[in-house]
Every structure is written in C-alpha cells, then in structure tokens.
Image (spheres, rainbow, N blue to C red):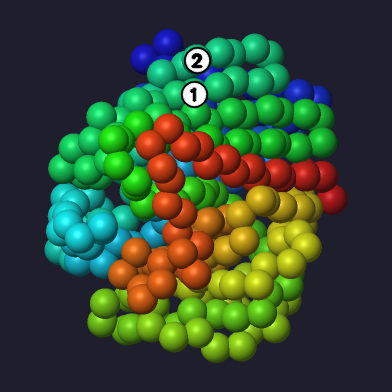
Amino acid sequence: MTSNIVELRAGDLRLALRADLGACIAGLWCGDSPVMRSTEPGLLERARVSGCYPLVPYSNRLGHRHFRWLGREYTTKPNYDEGNPHSVHGMAWQRPWTIESQREDDAVLQLEHPGDGDWPFAFSVRQAFALTPAGLNVGLAITNKADQPAPVGLGWHPYFPKRTRSRLHIELTDRWISDATTQLPTRKVAQPGIDADVAHLDYDNCFEGWQGAARLRDEKLSVRMTSSLPYLVVFTPPTKDYYCVEPVSHVSNAIHMADPAAHGLRTLQPGERFEAWMKLEIAAV
C-alpha cells in the first residue's frame, strides 16, 4: 500500500495521492482545513469517494454504453451505479497508475491503456502535480497509441466540502438541459453565470462560455480555479455535504451529437498528444 501513496507539501498545503486508485487526490488540506473532500490516503478505499479524480478519455456520461466512430460500432462496459445505462467518467479513474517521479512538492503519475472492453482505443496518459505555498497545479497529457484516429476528452472531477457559507461565482454563457429520464443533455439555454450560496443551488449540468476564474469561497477558504479546458460541469446535490466544479474539454455525451468536434470532442491521430491543465489558488480566509 505505501508504495502507492504520494504526499506533497508546500507551505501550509498538503496533497495526498493514491496511484493505485485511479491517480486520485485522496486529500488536499490547507493547514487543518480540507480544500477538497479529503481522506487520509491510507484509509481511502476507492476513487469515487476521493477528493478528485481524472476524467480520461471522456467526461461525464457516454450514452447507453455504445457509440459509432469512423463507421464502426463500439460498446463500453458498465462502470458506475448498478442499473445505470451509461458508462461514466471514462475508465482511467478505475485503473491503477504507476508513479513516474516524486519529489517534495511535485509528482508525475502515468497509465498505459492497451485498449479493452472499457475503452477500445489504446492510449498513454500522464498526470503531473505541482504544489506551491499558493496552490495546486495539475496537468494531464494523453497520447493516442491506437493505430487509428481516436476520440478523446479530458477533465477533472474535484469534490469540495459544502460548508455553512459556501458560495460559488462563475461567469458563463450557456447551460445544457438534460433529459430527466436519461440524464443526457438535449439542448442549451442562456445562463449568464452562477453567483449564489451553494446551499441554494441544484445543478447537475454542463456549462459553456466559462470566462475568467471560478471562485469558491466559504468561512475557511478562498479558492480560485482556472483551466485550459473550456467547459464546466457543476454538480450541487442538495442532500450531500459536497459540491463539484469540474473543468472538462467537451459537452457531456458529445460523441453522440451531430458534430462532436463542435462540442469539444477531440480526434487524435495515431501518436498525437492532447494536454490540459487546472490550477487552484488557495488562501485561508
């Protein structure tokens, strides 16, 4: 177990990773205050209850575990709740990664995927973490190792603790409405932004037109999130003690849309690489 745990420190910040659990962030703390939903790394049992995990090679739901690509039909396996008709969040978060390098304040984790029933196209992906006294920088870089062009999406799924005065401010332009039965996006509507207490929000939507930083603030911490990725999934379940603000590269289920590329899905040629980054600037209040 110990060899799968990575801990980084810089100033008041401590980051704990679990390479064997999808290269997830087990916890991120500023002093004694959790920045993300945080569990001591040795106690974490699965990536889904971690602080953050990578979304590779697609974000959110892949509708009905089936897609057509370059004239061929493909299926993916169930990988989420029992009875869920979709594959969710890719498959890299459910695979063990290896530790490529580790120092006091930075680390790189790596995964080689040969192609299988969870995702048919081979790829390699590296996730780099750099901790500073002011915050956390995370990078993802995926390379298509298949012998044909492959569809690719990237993102992160951070969970933030919902505190008494948790507040969210994000400048946006549009929100995708999802079908109540399938939970797949069907149309988009104008959404000038989000500026409200998290306790008053009930979102499980993908948003477009993200501009500037997403600002998360409560009675303990202020977090400023930026990313190279243009879309955000915001999940604010009223009955949970967390909420999620997820930088992603494409609209949920983009692979089933009439023009996937117009909704952010990338096509990587054999050997081609796609990189993304997310930055969290963290300050005690």
Q: Are marks 2 and 1 in contact (CB under 8 Å)?
A: yes
Residue 91 visible in the shown view: yes
Residue at x 43% of width, y 32% of height: 271
Residue at x 22% of width, y 43% of height: 120
Q: Amino acid at mark 1?
A: Leu
Residue 42 visible in the shown view: no
Measured as percent of width and height from the top left, residue 78 is found at 18, 53
Q: CA distance from mark 2 to mark 1?
A: 5 Å
Dividing the image into 4 quarters, which one contains the N terminus?
A: top left
Which sits earlier in the primary sequence, circle 2 or circle 1?
2
Badge 2: residue crowd in 10 Å (few <14, some 14–19, many ≥20):
few
- 102 up-or-down from 149: above or below: above
Residue at x 66% of width, y 51% of height: 228
Image-quadrant location for residue 146: top left
SS for callout 2 = strand
Q: Amino acid at mark 2?
A: Glu
- Extreme residue in the bottom direction: 189
- 104 up-or-down from 234: above or below: above
Measured as percent of width and height from the top left, residue 5 is found at 47, 19
Q: Is residue 192 left or right of residue 182?
A: right
Count of picture labels: 2
Residue at x 36% of width, y 73% of height: 257
Measured as percent of width and height from the top left, residue 225 is found at 71, 53
Instruction: Out of 98 and 47, give the one closest to the viewer.
Output: 98
Question: For residue 263, which numbered disc appears in the image?
Answer: none
Instruction: Out of 7 and 232, give the one closest to the viewer.
Output: 232
Q: Is residue 264 left or right of residue 226?
A: left
Question: For residue 100, which numbered disc appears in the image?
Answer: 2
SS for callout 1 = strand
Instruction: Out of 62 and 43, give the one closest to the viewer.
Output: 62
Instruction: Out of 30 and 256, give the one closest to the viewer.
Output: 256
Q: Which residue is mark 1?
A: 109
